Amino acid sequence: MYKIAVLGDRDSIYGFAALGLEVFPVQSGDEGAHTLRRLSEQDYAVVYITEALAKEIPGELDRCRESLMPAVIPIPGVHGNTGYGIDMVKRSVEQAVGSDIIFNGN
């Protein structure tokens, strides 16, 4: 059975444990990249990642984007939405569809 993980700073992710998701608090981009790579090699179908951490590890996110699993989904952290998550979604849609159908170039 596939699992769901949440990756990011401790304050932003620990509430997800109450929902039954596995949480992986990290303190740096290097630790986050290593943990994401480890999760992608296990039975994780979805990894939620805080926008702040995602911004620190674009290379590892690109590697994950090229594989079928896990789906890496950005979420706002405790400090709020940075806009990085929606940029990731926009890039993924552009890659899949071939054009910007969400913002029409804005």
Image (cartoon, rainbow, N blue to C red):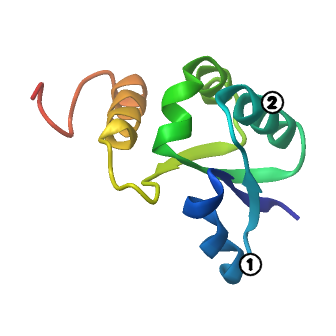
- Position of 31 compared to 57: left or right? right
Image check: 87 left or right of 42?
Answer: left
Helix, strand or loop at label 2? It is: helix
Q: Which mark is residue 85?
A: none
Where is 23 relative to 34, above or below? below
* SS label for mark 1: loop
Q: Of the two numbered discs 1 and 2 on the same chain, state the one appearing first in sequence.
A: 1
Q: Residue at x 55, y 60 (%)?
A: 12
Percent x, y for residue 40?
A: 80, 38
Q: Residue furthest bottom?
A: 18
The spot of residue 78 in percent (x, y) is 45, 60
Residue at point 72%, 45% (across, down): 26
Task: Identify the amino acid type marked 1.
Answer: Gly
Q: Where residue 30 appears, x then y in whole percent?
A: 72, 25
> What whole-number distance in Å separates the C-alpha atoms at marks 1 and 2?
23 Å
Q: Which residue is mark 2?
A: 34
Q: Mark 2 Cα within 10 Å, few/some/many (few <14, many 20+)? A: few
The answer to the question of whether label 1 and label 2 lie on touching residues, with beta carbons closer than 8 A, is no
Which residue is the site of mark 1? 20
With 2 as the anchor, is 58 left or right in this view? left
Q: How many marks?
A: 2
